Image (tube, grey):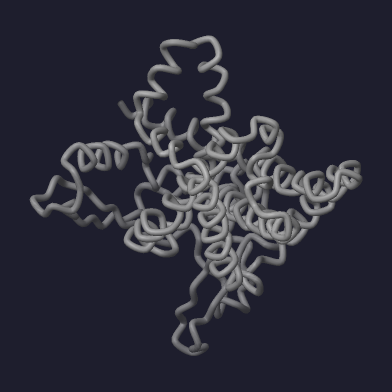
Amino acid sequence: MTAVLAGLGVFGAALVFGDSVIAPAISVLSAVEGLKVVQPGLEELIVPITAVIIVGLFSVQRRGTAAVGRLFGPVMFVWFVSIGACGVAGIARHPEILRALSTTYALNFMFGHFGIAFFALTAVVLAVTGAEALYADMGHFGRPAITRGWLLLVLPACVLSYLGQGALLLGDQGAVGSPFFLLAPGWARLPMVLLATAATVIDSQAVITGAYSALPVPRVPDTERTEVDRRGYAEDGIVLVTVYFGYMETPNIPDALRLLDPADTEGPIAIEDASYFLSKIELAMGTAPTMATWRKRLFIAASYITGDAAEYFRLPGERTVIMGSRIDV
């Protein structure tokens, strides 16, 4: 069971990293392609413009996006309201498209034209891609905010947009080349291209942030290995030492402590006599209705994947004290 859970975790991380590589380019390119709808003569500039945006997007990662992050919410709100409004306009012209809400059409298409439907699933996946960013954002905003945002804004706007595009194709099959942008009135197509580009950049940023948060550096030089904080008091003899390791390195706390400058720790540390204290949390099935029973069992099973902390950090077993606590989930 442990091996299966660990394998699934690695597989899921690999999917996120893969999506982080291809999603920004595909998303931004699809938005910039709206230029050929606005002005066909600009088609040759689509790829260069996309390349510049992607290079700029990845270049700013080291500086962070806190300065412009406060604009993400309003831009995405305007984006979803806009695509929903365009969808409503299309539905109003061909309301029979609402029959597509019935799953029987999808099932008939799948079983009646399986050869075509199987490959059409790639386009269906693109309709929901980006959902993994919700899990990254859930850590920042919490489940209630994500749930309300999805059910009250994102899902209705996407459904209206897809139905509107379908309605457009019912009346004009020639619009199949770019139904999304052709759904907007002529005067709004260029603003929609700009808004779509901004939205895809924000969406790409969310995916990239999720990948960067799970992908540390491979190796840390010894000069950057430790960070000492006196916690505001220089005379009490207590300091906080933060040690950094890359994902390709084997953590070794005693060796890292030997790198400390005695001036930062009020004298040399007796590494050979030092004691180490670790905490361990044991999860148990609780009675509180915090989550479904199967989720509790899965969560508890996943907690056993972790290895021995003392061995992982290369701590001497005879001088390591482990203090535990038990938490009901």
Q: How many marks?
A: 0
Going by the image, does 221 lie left or right of 115? right
Instruction: Relative to 28, say whether 198 is above or below.
Output: below
- The answer to whether residue 256 of the structure is visible from this angle is no
Instruction: Relative to 77, say whether 285 is above or below.
Output: above
Q: Residue at x 53, y 9 (%)?
A: 115
| Residue 105: quadrant of the picture | top left
Q: Residue at x 62, y 49 (%)?
A: 246
**Looking at this view, is 213 or 229 the one in front?**
213
- The answer to whether residue 37 of the structure is visible from this angle is yes
Q: Position of residue 87 (x, y in %)?
A: 53, 49
Residue lying farthest left?
A: 287
Q: Residue at x 42, y 49 (%)?
A: 316
Q: Position of residue 118 (x, y in %)?
A: 52, 16
Q: Position of residue 312 (x, y in %)?
A: 45, 44
**Looking at this view, is 159 or 27 the one in front?**
159
**Looking at this view, is 325 or 156 the one in front?**
156
Going by the image, does 165 lie left or right of 231? right
Q: Residue at x 49, y 30 (%)?
A: 11
| Residue 209: quadrant of the picture | bottom right
Looking at the figure, which quarter contains the N terminus?
Answer: top left
Q: Position of residue 198 (x, y in %)?
A: 68, 59
